[in-house]
Amino acid sequence: MKVPLAWLQLTREKMRLVVALAGIGFADLLMFMQLGFKTSLFESAIAIHKRFQGDLVLISPRSEFIAQMVSFPRTRLYQAKGFEGVESISYLYIAPGKWKNPANPSYNRSIFIFGFDPERPVFDMPEVNQQLDRIKLPDVYLFDRKSRAEFGPVAEQFEKGNPVVTELSDRKIKIGGLFDLGVSFAADGNVITSDLNFIRVTKRSMDTIDVGFIKLKPGADPQAVLENMQKKLPDDVKVLTMEGFIQMEKKYWETGTAIGFIFGLGVAMGFIVGIVIVYQILYTDVADHLPEYATLKAMGYTDLYLLGVVFQEAILLSILGYIPGFVISLGLYNLAKSGTGLPMGMTFDLASTVFVLTVVMCFVSGAIAVRKLQGADPADIF
């Protein structure tokens, strides 16, 4: 069986090959981590959105993302209920609160509070909806067991059957249940309660809400109802589909903050680092074998064949260098997930994106390095 010339040249100097693969793996690792954090940013930001139930969403036009919603009159939601095709409505209050760690009362941390009318559930979360009777009680809250550890051993104590009592924004509260949501770049922890408990702890008026949810009758056209509402409702509210609400959140984090740009820049830097490393390897390899390339030319091999050898080396390097970068990234993803609580995980889209970038990176390096082959002139040898 014929062994490809490209493979023989790569493996001729084992140490150079190891250094090349380490460099490519490092570049891949940079891209994996930056894309991983960027993906987890979006996934954590819209985790709450995916758990809302409703077909249309009513918000203030000044609202940009879930952590800083601008309130609007609750009467707008009741007006929306009168439109043809609407079956039911519900509403949500959102605000940060000052949480006191029950195990360390001197330690305070900001936590997100979600409040709604238990008779009109807004979450498509069985764990929450099975505990609605509990949050109807005064000052009783459900705690997100995936909140960061700095909030104290709340979930552990509750699951052991121990009562958990603490303070939220200087008001004494009791934990009546748990649920799973998770942290995000905007929230380190979450609690859910009734609208009345929310008003008690935040001292807000019930006349304004942060998000309104509209459930349509079977067969109703969401886009048609949306356009009708947007046309007839006052301009102090904005109507979105649930998917539009999700895209609004993504757009904010991608373009409205520096975070999306920073992660994108990190991917670009990893890509450039990889190009430089692979170029140095291929250029050195071509330079070291220039006489042999000239001999091949004298024997009748075309420039196209020699270019193919260099590009084969580039492809081999991209595949071999990708493997350690991928494996190490799996471990770092698990480490980051356990340390931050963010939904870091390898996906097919993520793995394939970095692989394609690696192949392109090595191909570009090979395209730059093959210019050296122009100097492989048989006349210089014979």
Image: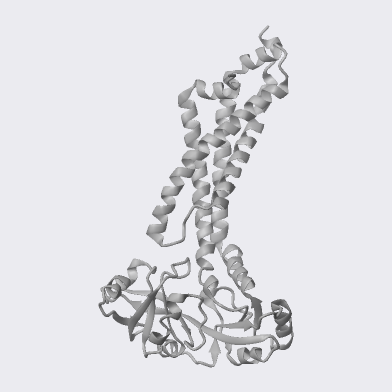
Q: In which quarter of the image is residue 365?
A: top right
Nearer-the-camera pick, 81 or 199:
81
- In this rendering, does residue 236 appear at all? no
Residue positioned 50% across, 32% down in the render:
20
The picture places residue 119, in percent across and down from the top left corner, at: 49, 89
Q: Up-down: is 202 above or below 15?
A: below
* Quadrant of the drawing holding the N terminus: top right
Nearer-the-camera pick, 24 or 53:
53
* Quadrant of the drawing holding the C terminus: top right
Identity of the residue furthest to the top in this view:
382
The picture places residue 33, in percent across and down from the top left corner, at: 49, 51
The picture places residue 121, in percent across and down from the top left corner, at: 50, 83
Residue positioned 57% across, 31% down in the render:
316
Q: In this view, does 224 lie to the left or right of 122?
A: right
Q: Up-down: is 5 above or below 362?
A: above
Q: Up-down: is 215 above or below 319?
A: below
